[in-house]
């Protein structure tokens, strides 16, 4: 997992093993061994790598593209929860992991926003209203 994620992130960022080695403070050979799965960097180096690539430490170590429709690691704070099916009346089931992460419970009200070029967004109503109030009051930067 780790070594495959490291290779895909390095290629995605168009970096060389030498470039990574310089930023992490190791030799190119050390990076080559990490990518080959021969060794694993210590926790401090892993933290530097995660920050360098903008991913979580957990995803750097454990992300499995096969379990995520073949997609590479998402940036930190971005998620792919899977696919849902739209029912006859337009209803969807929000995946459990997403409900837990965003604290969505049965009975909560949600706002659905749409942009023809971007798609749909689903927000909890209280968050949306707080955001709207911040815009209205000119306090958006404090949020």
Image (tube, grey):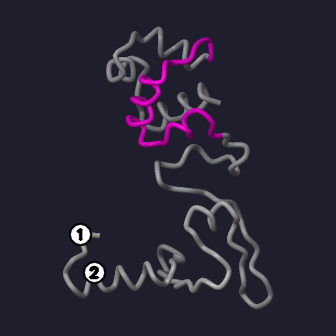
Please report the residue visible at 42 percent of the width from the left and 12 percent of the height from the top: 28
Q: Give x and y (percent) for residue 92.
A: 71, 78
In the picture, the disc for residue 142 is 1
Q: Give x and y (percent) for residue 43.
A: 48, 24
Task: Give the side of residue 89 with respect to residue 6, left or right.
Answer: right
Q: Give x and y (percent) for residue 107.
A: 65, 85
Q: Give the SS element for disc 1.
A: helix
Task: Give the side of residue 63 with respect to residue 27, left or right.
Answer: right
Please report the residue visible at 63 percent of the width from the left and 48 percent of the height from the top: 71
Q: Nearer the viewer, residue 127 or 17?
A: 127
Query: What span is in magenta?
Result: 37-63
- When the figure is inspected, residue 123 is found, relative to residue 102, above or below; the finding is below
| 81 in the magenta segment | no
Task: Give the side of residue 142 with respect to residue 75, left or right.
Answer: left
Q: Quadrant of residue 24?
A: top left
- Tag 2 near tag 1, CB within 8 Å: yes
| 42 in the magenta segment | yes
* Residue at which label 2 appears: 134
In the picture, the disc for residue 11 is none
Q: Quadrant of residue 98?
A: bottom right
- When the figure is inspected, residue 66 is found, relative to residue 39, above or below; the finding is below
């Amino acid at each position: 997992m780790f070594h495959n994620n490291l290779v895909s992130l390095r290629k995605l960022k168009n970096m060389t093993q030498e470039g990574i080695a310089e930023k992490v403070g190791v030799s190119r050979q050390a990076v080559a061994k990490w990518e080959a799965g021969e060794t694993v960097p210590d926790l401090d180096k892993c933290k530097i790598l995660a920050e360098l690539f903008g991913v979580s430490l957990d995803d750097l170590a454990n992300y499995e593209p096969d379990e995520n429709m073949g997609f590479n690691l998402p940036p930190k704070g971005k998620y792919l929860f899977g696919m849902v099916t739209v029912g006859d009346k337009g209803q969807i089931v929000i995946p459990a992991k997403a409900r837990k992460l965003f604290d969505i419970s049965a009975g909560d009200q949600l706002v659905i926003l749409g942009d023809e070029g971007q798609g749909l967004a689903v927000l909890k109503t209280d968050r949306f209203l707080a955001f709207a109030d911040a815009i209205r009051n000119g306090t958006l930067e404090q949020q």
